[in-house]
Image (cartoon, grey):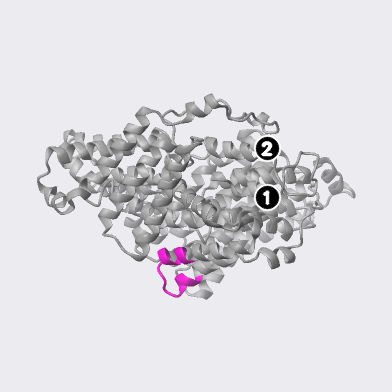
Amino acid sequence: MTSAAQRVGHPTSDDEGEGTVGTAQTRSTEELIAEYDAERPARRITGPLAHVIGAVALGVSLYALYAVFNPIPVLPYRMSFLAAVLPLTFLSYRPGMRLPRWVPRPARLGKTEPRLGKTERSKDAPGVADWILAGASVVVCAYPLLGFDDFIRRTFEPSTLDMVMGAGCALLVLEATRRTVGAILPGICLLFVGYAYYGGYLPLDWAVGHRGYDIERILVHLYMGTEGLFGVPLDVAATYIVLFAIYGAVLEYSGAGAFFVNISFAAFRRSAAASGRTVTLAGFLLGTVSGSGTATTVSLGSVAWPILRRAGYSPESGGGILAAAGIGAILSPPTLGAAAFIIAEYLKVSYLTLLLYAAVPTVLYYLGIILAIEIDSRRLGTRDLDLEIPSAGRLLARFGYHFSSLIAIVVLMALGVSPFRAVVYATVLAFLLSFLDREHRLGPRRMAQALSAGTLGVLPVAATTAAAGIIVAVVTLTGLGLKGSRIIIDLAGGDLAMTAVVAALAVLILGLAVPVTASFIIAAVIIGPALQTLGVSPEAAYMFIFYYAVLSEVTPPTALAAVAASAITGGNTIKTMMMTWKYTLPAFLVPFAFVLAPGGQALLWQAPLPEVLMALAVSAVAVAALAVTTGGWMVRRAGWPERVLSAGAAIALLHLEPTAVAIGLALLAVALLIHLVLRRPADGQVSHRAQKGN
């Protein structure tokens, strides 16, 4: 699937196009996405097989669209969906984890890479084992559908064939997951299965002990019901996620990605901080097309890094901005990330309600990035650039229709239309509007490619959610959720604040090893009950876990988004991670207000509008104080006294309680007074520092 940023402008060298927005790294962008994004197909298949895979993927997309208007029973639909996407996964992903030899090192990103030769293409084609696994996956997933009613009745007395098929389905799902996101998640799944089997040998007075279950009972729970492989996580992938993936692909193929980048650059034309602000806005808009933080970082970086470099940003600062903007895309309405759809399903709330939950935190997240960019602009002495881009007014007049489908989704859901139908209607609208642009009009061939790309983009998520269903099944079978929550509460001494800290660390550590969607599912069934036991509302608990699952992508030592950004900028990887952490710091602290502050519910729009606006205003001041703390700048360069006082002010303000807010404002006022009185630089000192930053 072609990246949106690859459609922006025409290839230019580093020296050419000082005023154009473009990239010479079309293939390098694809390769970086394949390398750093844990949820992207690895094979580059060409020829007749590519057409076959595309045709099957097209059929899956049409099947998903058909099911929106002609509902299919839940369990048969999940089984048939997995029977279609699992074979595609084995044909689209390599069995090994090594990258092909032609993937460039970061230092070679400016050089032209050779095309794949015939030998390389043949080595990248599926082998005999891949075809066998693809065929076997069809058999084990479709087997229950051959006599579905009898299959369900056999739940209490399964046949040997049922058990063989169940074991085969579980193993194939784990192998597909290993190919797409690595071996750690399948390993965790096997540990949970081992716990279900061997847990009976643990003393019953142990917190995690249980009576034990034999293989037959475990397989029945995994394969013959709605709790395991065909559970809610897979259902979310087969409904919400695949439909939004199709929408994103159609939006991308219609040229929306190019428009989103260009309108972002046109919006901030003449300002020293314009380049950084532009990248932030472009990341937000591109996220509606990509749906992946790392992919958005790479796609945006291939276009925007030359602009940031010419503006005076260091490789590490530029990489931090790119990674923060990319991750923000999956924290923000209207699409959010895949895990957000699971939240809606778990809470049994509409997707529109979930968008309201995310609205205020999104504003605070981007406010933190913008303030940090403004501070860095002054600290580094960045400069404005004259880019040869049409004015924002001209771009909106010509291509502003690309916003229509995004607005349509929200409006339709507000009118009571289901999210499934709303996104389908928005997809149709994007398709029709594509004919306003001759270059990107979606004729039959391009529309088929877009629909195929939608399904191919959801393959790793489908494998991940099916595997996560194994974990959910073991948790419900053994009661591990309640047992795990008691352990967490005991570890924190029964204190809510300490429990929140332990929960945040646990989700971050889990997210270092597995993708965002999987880490959220695992944490939701084990950590979520611990927070709710101590009085946290379900929506606050799930949103807390969601934010930390996403933020694991910018958390050292893995921080995939930051690593990908450093590969583009050529910056030091660790320093880029730390810069990304600086830009995203408010997102690490604001979720604590969800669960700890008396007024934290207002941040999730679970309060009257005046309280929501007050919480937003106070939290915005807290975010500004955090920006001073991390950036070291107020009116001019700030010293440690101001920064320490600002940190204390931010923490107090985020309590959202009148006394704490008063203390926070007082601390911030003292910091500002000290700054204005004691930090009077000599004449020319500021300009000298700015010149040095250049």
Asked if the magenta segment contains residue 417, the reply would be: yes
Q: Residue at x 23, y 37 (%)?
A: 167
Q: Is residue 66 above or below residue 506?
A: below
Q: Which is more N-terminal, label 1 or label 2?
A: 1
| Rendering coords of residue 181 (x, y %) | 43, 37
| In-front residue for pair 534/337 | 337
Q: Is residue 553 left or right of residue 188?
A: right
Return the residue at label 1: 8
Q: Look at the magenta stretch and give its main secondary structure.
A: helix
Q: Is residue 564 above or below residue 84?
A: above
Q: Which label sits in the foreground, 2 or 1? A: 1
Q: Is residue 349 above or below residue 137?
A: below
Q: Residue at x 29, y 60 (%)?
A: 72
| Rendering coords of residue 297 (x, y %) | 60, 45
Q: Residue at x 69, y 54 (%)?
A: 278
- Name the kind of residue labelled 1 in the image: Val
| In-front residue for pair 595/568 | 568
| Image quarter in which the C terminus is found | top right
Return the residue at label 2: 569
- Name the kind of residue labelled 2 in the image: Thr
How far apart are the alpha carbons under marks 2 and 1?
A: 19 Å
Q: Residue at x 45, y 75 (%)?
A: 415
| In-front residue for pair 506/678 | 506
Classify mark 2: helix, strand or loop.
helix
| Rendering coords of residue 302 (x, y %) | 66, 42
Asked if the magenta segment contains residue 489, the reply would be: no
The answer to whether residue 497 is visible is no
Crowd band around label 1 with a 10 angstrom C-alpha radius: few (<14), some (14–19), many (20+): many
Q: Is residue 198 above or below residue 271?
A: above
Q: Is residue 691 left or right of residue 289?
A: right
Residues rendered magenta in the picture: 411-425
The answer to whether residue 166 is visible is yes
